[in-house]
Amino acid sequence: MFTGIITDIGTIASVNNEGGDTRLGIRTKFDLSQTDIGASIACAGCCLTVVEKKDDVFFVDVSAESLSKTNIGQWGEGVQINLEQALKMGDELGGHIVSGHVDGLATLTALEKEGDSHRLTFDVPKDLGGFLASKGSVTLDGISLTVNEVNGSSFGVNIIPHTWDNTTLGVIKQGDSVHLEIDMLARYVQRALAYKA
């Protein structure tokens, strides 16, 4: 589990597509001596398992299922991604509960500067639009954000300067896609409403 509070921007150091799955090497400022093999790290919001470590690089395997639901297949050497290590008991819950399970991709349709902040508008697949609510939570590329407004399958968020400067949102462009994770509570409410015993 994660909170959506980004603690490092990592860099893709290597991509190996031999043998079926994709193995990524990700360079980080994390103290990897404190990270166990088998640990979970949210990589741009995707919960991935550390399978190897070397110096300041950890390695993860990405399955075909994960590749089909994300834009990880487009990552090449030098691409920067948001990173968050898994929660430990007693850690501060600064964002909201995030599972690291990507539901789909959100596409940036508008970006406007508002004072020192930035207002971003995203389109999501229609089947995910119903999970978004004004003042509810959403996770974009691993970042916990508050939804400002919803219009059908489009929604807006306001990005404060700290988040803009300390995540990959600072380099986003219109037309770019980011990993979307809907709020866990919304997922369970929808399931309860749809369930017929």
Image (cartoon, rainbow, N blue to C red):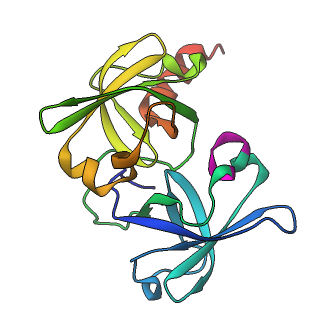
Compared with 6, 101 (above or below) is: above
Pinpoint residue 70: horizontal percent, then vertical percent: 63, 44
Pinpoint residue 132: horizontal percent, then vertical percent: 42, 22
Q: Which residue is more in the foreground, 26 or 191?
A: 26
User: What residue range appears in magenta?
Assistant: 68-73
Q: Assess whether residue 70 is covered by the magenta stretch.
A: yes
What residue do we see at 33% from left, 44% from top?
Answer: 96
Q: Assess whether residue 64 is covered by the magenta stretch.
A: no
What residue do we see at 69% from left, 51% from top?
Answer: 73
User: Residue 159 occupies which quadrant of the picture?
Assistant: top left
Q: Do we see residue 168 in this rendering?
A: yes
Residue farthest to the top? 152
Asked whether, in this view, residue 148 is left or right of residue 138, the answer is left
Asked whether, in this view, residue 117 is left or right of residue 175, the answer is left
Q: Do we see residue 94 in this rendering?
A: no
Compared with 153, 19 (above or below) is: below
Compared with 127, 45 (above or below) is: below
Of helix, strand and loop, which mostly describes the magenta segment?
helix
Q: Which residue is more in the foreground, 5 or 70?
A: 70
Residue farthest to the right? 19
Quarter that holds the N terminus: bottom left
What residue do we see at 45% from left, 10% from top?
Answer: 152
Quarter that holds the C terminus: top right
Residue farthest to the left? 115
Pinpoint residue 192: horizontal percent, then vertical percent: 53, 21
User: Residue 147 occupies which quadrant of the picture?
Assistant: top left
Asked whether, in this view, residue 1 is left or right of residue 128, the answer is left
